[in-house]
Image: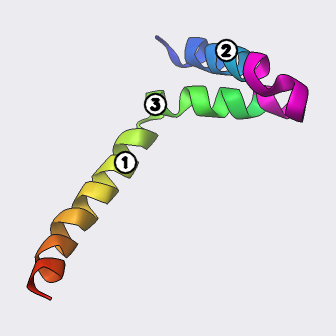
């Protein structure tokens, strides 16, 4: 999917799921969350976690 489609889908799902609780902010948060995978944010977070795990693994194992 392209970025716009992911943003619209995320906004629609968030509005349906939590729109009554937080109002129009659900649309904004859904659009942001829907677009994150397309921007590589999740890959960046995963790489950071993996990198820390690899670096800290030997230290924790020896201590």
Q: CA distance from mark 1 to mark 2?
A: 23 Å
Q: Percent from the top left, x then y, of residue 35?
A: 56, 28
Query: Which residue is label 1 attached to?
Result: 44
Is 20 in the magenta?
A: yes
Q: Percent from the top left, x then y, of residue 36?
A: 52, 34
Q: Quadrant of the C terminus?
A: bottom left
Query: Which residue is label 2 attached to?
Result: 8
Tell whether label 1 touches label 3 (CB within 8 Å).
no
Query: Which residue is label 3 attached to?
Result: 37
Neighbours of disc 3 within 10 Å: few (<14), some (14-19), many (20+): some
- Report the residue at 49% width, 13% height from top: 2
Q: Left or right: where does residue 29 sit relative to residue 20?
A: left
Is 53 in the magenta?
A: no
Q: Percent from the top left, x then y, of residue 24?
A: 88, 28
- Report the residue at 67% width, 27% height from top: 31
- What span is in magenta? 15-27
């Amino acid at each position: 999917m392209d970025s716009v489609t992911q943003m619209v889908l995320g906004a629609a799902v968030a509005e349906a799921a939590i729109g009554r609780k937080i109002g129009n902010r659900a649309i904004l948060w859904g659009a942001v969350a829907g677009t994150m995978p397309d921007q590589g944010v999740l890959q960046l977070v995963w790489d950071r976690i993996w990198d820390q795990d690899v670096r800290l693994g030997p230290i924790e194992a020896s201590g």
